[in-house]
């Protein structure tokens, strides 16, 4: 069996992260794996902005992992180009957006810092 997991909680300053698994069997027994380390050598492999689930029905989680220490601007733009959300948020944060009242369709999430802009397309079903 193969498993994959993207850890979005890692700070940009962490070079080595330690993990272990806690496995539960059908009979209720459990055991821990050996501790494993992952060395990022100062570079993270995940995106600065992650949005999930995508597509979504009512809520979407926006995870921002910027290397910039100051606040960034989070915008959500609808298919007509109208900015429907415009907020200042910390450069490293998780934000839950309740979009249940919005029309189905395509939206763009845009996160802008002092020197960079990242965009993600999301779909509301």
Image (cartoon, rainbow, N blue to C red):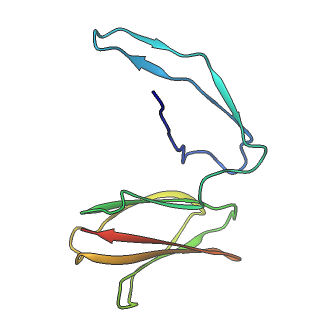
Left/right of residue 100 with respect to residue 46 in the rendered view: left
Specify the quadrant that holds the C terminus.
bottom left
Task: Classify residue 60 by image quadrant.
Answer: bottom left
Q: Position of residue 96 (x, y in %)?
A: 38, 59
Q: Position of residue 33 (x, y in %)?
A: 54, 16
In the image, residue 76 sits, relative to residue 54, either above or below, namely below
Specify the quadrant that holds the N terminus.
top left
In the image, residue 16 sits, relative to residue 110, either above or below, namely above
Depth check: 106 or 89 in front?
A: 106
Depth check: 37 or 100 in front?
A: 37
Residue at image location 34% in from the left, 77% down from the top: 106
Residue at image location 28% in from the left, 77% down from the top: 105
Left/right of residue 79 with respect to residue 112 in the rendered view: left
Residue at image location 69% in from the left, 63% down from the top: 69
In the image, residue 32 sits, relative to residue 93, either above or below, namely above
Depth check: 111 or 1 in front?
A: 1
Q: Residue furthest right?
A: 41
Q: Position of residue 55 (x, y in %)?
A: 32, 63
Residue at image location 54% in from the left, 48% down from the top: 8
Q: How many marks?
A: 0
Q: Position of residue 84 (x, y in %)?
A: 36, 82
């Amino acid at each position: 069996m193969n498993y994959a997991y993207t850890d979005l909680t890692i700070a940009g300053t962490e070079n080595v992260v330690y993990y272990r698994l806690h496995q539960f069997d059908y009979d209720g027994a459990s055991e821990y794996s050996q501790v494993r380390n992952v060395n990022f050598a100062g570079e993270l492999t995940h995106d600065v902005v992650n949005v999930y689930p995508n597509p979504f029905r009512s809520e979407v989680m926006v995870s921002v992992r910027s290397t910039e220490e100051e606040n960034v601007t989070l915008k959500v733009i609808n298919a007509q180009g109208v900015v429907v959300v415009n907020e200042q948020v910390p450069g490293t944060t998780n934000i839950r957006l309740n979009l249940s009242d919005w029309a189905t369709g395509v939206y763009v999430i845009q996160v802008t810092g002092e020197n960079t802009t990242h965009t993600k397309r999301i779909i509301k079903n």
